[in-house]
Image (spheres, rainbow, N blue to C red):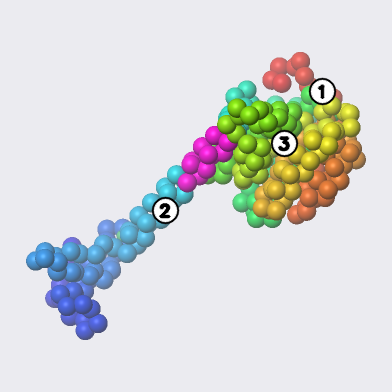
């Protein structure tokens, strides 16, 4: 540090002066020197201070994200993504033809641009034949956000959601229906699989529950990814037209899975 003649500045509190100083990284700056209880305190390089402040703010944000995830997991009473799906990633999705390559590209783009997706609450539908890897890609998007960003993501099947909610009707249940719904409405991304899996007309309970979730997310402008083996035209019957209208807001991305089943083949 250079030692230069000290200037005295009239606006500074008594006992404070400014002197030129040098930061190894950022070069020259004006250093404030305070006299406190007979000792001298010197201000640090403002650029270094700003970087340190930003780092601690980022750490604080990451902490908050972790706390939110833990609170969500407590409400779900389970992992945010079921264990068997934790190994599904975008990188280990097997691509054998152009249609699969295109589907993978859509999913990668959705994750890569998630901050913009989140701004407008843009939803996505992975739809088409069974055994084409929709679940793999859906779970992979949730995994990617959960493990590589500070965003929260939950993967659930409709069947598991309905079962969880029925479970709360037991008077010994520690969780309420509101807890379960909140744990599906609050995450930054919800991936909801097996829409219309029964092929039968859904019950009122199922339709009301789906609408509570989709509408709750819609009101928060939070994006949802829907997975279904149905044809696009049958989604309204399976989840209610009001739900489909909500999903369409913000520009729904539809990814078709129209090739033959890969089940039984290695990797699926
Ligand atoms: Zn510096």
| Residue 77 image offset from top left, x and y in percent | 58, 30
Q: CA distance from mark 3 to mark 1?
A: 21 Å
Secondary element at tag 3? strand
Region rendered in magenta: 64-75
Query: On the image, which quarter does residue 110 sit in?
Result: top right
The quarter in which the N terminus is drawn is bottom left
Of the two numbered discs 2 and 3 in the rendering, the one whose residue sits closer to the viewer: 3
Task: Say which of 39 and 25 sits in front.
Answer: 39
| Residue 105 image offset from top left, x and y in percent | 71, 40
Residue placed farthest to the left in the image? 38
Task: Say which of 13 and 216 sits in front.
Answer: 216
Q: State yes or no: residue 68 in magenta.
A: yes
Label 2 close to label 3 by CB (< 8 Å): no
- Residue at figure coordinates x 89%, y 32% from the top left: 201
- Residue at figure coordinates x 9%, y 66% from the top left: 38
Q: Which residue is mark 3?
A: 192
Q: Which residue is mark 1?
A: 261
| Residue 143 image offset from top left, x and y in percent | 60, 34
Q: State yes or no: residue 268 in magenta.
A: no
Q: Is residue 111 visible?
A: no
Q: CA distance from mark 2 to mark 3?
A: 33 Å
Query: On the image, which quarter does residue 228 sit in?
Result: top right
Q: Which residue is mark 2?
A: 57
Work out whether 23 lies above or below 147: below
Mark 2: few, some, or many residues within 10 Å (few <14, many ≥20)? few
- Residue at figure coordinates x 74%, y 44% from the top left: 212
Q: CA distance from mark 2 to mark 1?
A: 47 Å
């Amino acid at each position: 540090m250079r030692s230069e003649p000290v200037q005295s500045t009239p606006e500074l509190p008594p006992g404070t002066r400014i002197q030129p100083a040098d930061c190894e990284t950022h070069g020259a700056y004006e250093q404030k020197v305070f006299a406190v209880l007979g000792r001298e305190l010197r201000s640090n390089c403002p650029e270094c201070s700003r970087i340190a402040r930003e780092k601690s703010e980022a750490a604080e944000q990451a902490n908050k994200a972790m706390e939110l995830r833990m609170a969500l997991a407590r409400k779900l009473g389970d992992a945010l993504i079921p264990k068997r799906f934790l190994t599904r990633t975008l990188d280990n999705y097997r691509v054998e033809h152009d249609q699969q390559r295109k589907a993978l590209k859509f999913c990668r783009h959705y994750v890569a641009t998630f901050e913009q997706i989140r701004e407008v609450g843009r939803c996505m539908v992975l739809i088409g034949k069974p055994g084409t890897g929709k679940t793999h890609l859906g779970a992979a998007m949730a995994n990617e956000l959960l493990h590589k960003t500070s965003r929260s993501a939950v993967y659930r099947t409709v069947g598991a959601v309905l079962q969880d909610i029925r479970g709360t009707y037991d008077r010994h249940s520690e969780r309420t229906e509101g807890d379960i719904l909140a744990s599906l409405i609050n995450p930054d991304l919800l991936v909801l699989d097996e829409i219309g899996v029964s092929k039968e007309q859904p019950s009122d309970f199922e339709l009301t529950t789906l609408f509570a979730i989709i509408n709750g997310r819609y009101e928060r402008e939070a994006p949802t990814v829907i997975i279904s083996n149905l044809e696009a035209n049958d989604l309204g019957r399976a989840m209610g037209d009001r739900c489909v209208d909500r999903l369409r807001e913000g520009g729904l991305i539809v990814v078709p899975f129209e090739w033959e089943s890969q089940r039984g083949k290695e990797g699926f």
